[in-house]
Amino acid sequence: MNAPNPRPLRIALVIDTLAGGGSEHCLRRLAHGLAARGQAVFVYCLRTPGIDCNPLAAAGVTVRAAESQGRDLSLPVRLGRWLATDRINLVHAHSCAALVASFLPAKWQGRTVVHVWHGWPLGSPSRHHLLARTLDRWVAGIGLNSQALRTRLHPRLAACAVHLPNGLDLPALPRGPARQALAALAGCTLDGPVLLSIGNLRPEKGTLDLLLAFSRLRRDWPRARLLLVGGVIDRAYAVRVATAVETLQLETHVHWCGPQPDAWKLLAGADVFCLSSRSESMPNVVLEAMTQGVPIVATAVGDVGALPSASPDDAPHTDLLLRSPDTALLVPPASPAALAAALHQSLGDPGAALRRAAHAQREAQARFSNTAMVGRYEAFYHHALTRCGPNRSNTQPARARILMLGPAPPQTGGMVTSIQNLLRGPLSADFDLALLPTTQRSTDSGRTPWILGRCTAMARHVRALHTLWHRLRSEPIALLHIHTCSGFTFWRNLLDVAIAHTTGTRVALHIRGGGFADFLAALGPGRRLLARTGLAWADAVIVLSSGWRKRLWRYSPCAHWYIVPNAYDPALLAAAPRASTTPPDRPCRFLFLGPLTRAKGLTDLLVAGGLLKERHIPCELLIAGPATPEELGAWQRQAAALELTTHTHWLGPIAPAERPALFASADCFVHPSHCEGAPNVVLEAAAAGLPLVATAVGALPEIFAPLAAHDGEWLAPLVPPGDATVLAKYMAAFATNPKYRARAAAACHQHIRDQYGPARTATALSRVYAAVLPGVAPRVYSSPAEDTVPHPAQRSAIRAACSTITAPAPPVLAPIGDSR
């Protein structure tokens, strides 16, 4: 931590108001701490302060209120006048609205501006959020009180943003007076367990989820009471909360206490503090609960905490407030059932709950003190004052910086999922990973003239190439990791490879998409030569399986080939555990998840469903995935022609966060695709505990080879693509034989969790990076495995190594064994 500057800084902390939630509390503590360290601190409120400012004035902090309302065009003028009068060195925008209001007057006067993010709305971002993300390009420093907020920024800005976690110093209060204060607020005797929630009424806080969970909890704890403390931010949401209280008949057990000064003093009197938020960054109220030694049940959002990892190989989260079950009980957001179960567990075992609370109290004192927070901010300010322009250092970072090039949300598909898994996986601990999203095609091309559409697309790609060239020239990027597939994407990515070579940046081409081999085979001699040269020009060419490497090697023997398997996302699957058995009164549910196209085998699935119906085998088809209204109508008509209307449920597009619940609602997973690579959705379904029937395409025969026929019974049956009869045969076996289904589910679950977790993928990819980048050592995140081949030095060595590679033969259909 940097020592304070002998010459005091003159700092303007700009914020909307001082009354409110976590960011306002953080600013007040920061102002007190900076003033105590000898800095000249000024607080500029865009509106009324909303609190008694005498404590700040007593600490030597000057508070100025603009009393602005609506779109006040004179506000920048007043802020500029204050900046000049107070001779401000540094302007710290504490909110997006504060940055928008103070940016122009501060820049006009040559003041240094920094912006610290304290959260993100659950719904659509406001105009201030969108403007702030643009203005962040020209501030001297960007701070984040939560690591989860990095995904909200442009990748270049997120890479250089500084993590500034909150901190506070609060004394631990006795339980008795706090309990009496809670009883006074409730207006009754608290003769049962008391649950306390502190937070303003708005959708982000998930109060409706908490009410549903409390309604379930009262079945076992009828004398429990829930106290809600906080102001009303969203009036429409407050009406919904009041209606839910009446509907659930909780009027006598839920007490709305309104906003309370120093609400943290109430925490020690509660039996459980509950945070039911659907969106958070780093909430101060959780820190306050930790300091008071109260048991905590919270949702795993933002930097609050992460759900328990499904794999022991996953890297620990070191920046999170809570760890489950060590310091709190964490549940997925928007899950009242899980929240009710965690509350029941905490109340049912008070000894364990108090041990967790004591552990959390010790961690709060050690990791999140107000002194440490003020020191981090001071170092951040001094660093910003020594820089000009964007917050970029000219020194080589301690970790090798890897720039990934590929699609990003809101685009969907297996490539997006794989990239996001890599960015969130264990590699981020040892490599500086960033993503440059590729251009997205316009959605209104059908209404745009052909020539104009072509020109627009060309201009879009030229801008993307210029952006890439600028980043490679201006940042110390060690490796450009390009995620590519067949068609136009591949030819465009060859231009990216050429640009990287002009800047001296090493390149890895990561081939995805099951049709890449067919794409190369269909090329003419000239374009095939160009493709061969482009593959050989890359420093590494990554494929998903040994079978793929064997098929593709002959198209470019001089390329440097490596194998990096896909992996499932444990955090995604931990959110919704599956039931172990199917209810006896419900038909077997077969889930299909993917684009509704013929290439994904949807026609085969419907025909197979029709065959099961003819045999009077009870089953339901859950079909989830994107499709245009015209395409969806065509599929529904085909299902109607097969008399499957009442047996088929069309669920539409499914977001990644919704997949756990979808997997939990199904009994089997069906993937009848005609062309694939190593589909993430199959790995996720198997890891989630679903038995599966899939086609023997892409890397699937290699992935599920260990589960081939055993004693006449297939534990992961793979069928020929396009063969609806065989597909129906194995679907019938699963639908009519629950014991067989259970054995297959257990085998798939264990195999995928053991062999295709993120640690194995991270280990394989780190070996590729180590082979390509000088001075980088490979990392091992799991037990050693044959994930990659050694980096070849000569063409003959490549040919010799690749000629010995063999892939498992596609499995031959075996008869279905009888149930045992």
Image (tube, rainbow, N blue to C red):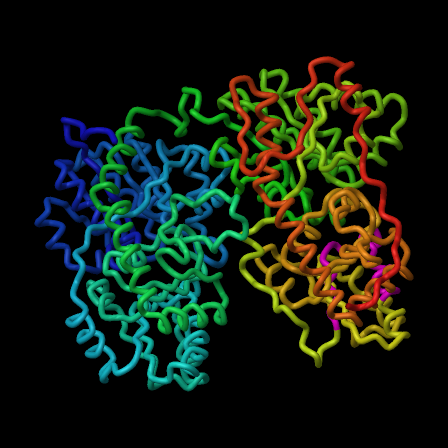
Q: Nearer the viewer, residue 708 or 650?
A: 708
Identify whether 14 is placed above or below 289.
Answer: above
In the rendered view, tell whether residue 361 sits above or below residue 797. below
Say which residue appears at 20% left-offset and 63% top-offset. Answer: 262
Front residue (pair 448, 685): 685
Looking at the picture, how far across and down is residue 298, in whole percent? 39, 62
List x then y, in percent, for residue 622. 73, 66
Q: Is residue 285 left or right of residue 239?
A: left
Q: Quadrant of residue 2?
A: top left
Looking at the image, which residue is at 26% across and 52% down? Answer: 362
638 to the left or right of 586:
right
Horizontal side, residue 407 vs residue 559: left or right: left
**Residue 780, percent across and down?**
54, 33
Q: Is residue 815 magenta?
A: no
Q: Position of residue 569 (x, y in %)?
A: 58, 49
Residue 249 position (above or below residue 298): below
Residue at x 75% of width, y 51% of height: 707
The reply to whether residue 434 is visible in this rendering is yes
Q: Which residues are magenta?
A: 588-608
Task: Say whether residue 237 is visible.
Answer: no
Quick one: quadrant of the N terminus? Answer: top left
Where, by quadrant of the figure, is residue 52 drawn? Answer: bottom left
Q: Quadrant of the C terminus?
A: bottom right
Q: Nearer the viewer, residue 202 or 101?
A: 202
Which residue occupies 37% across, 45% down? 117
| Count of numbered circles in the view | 0
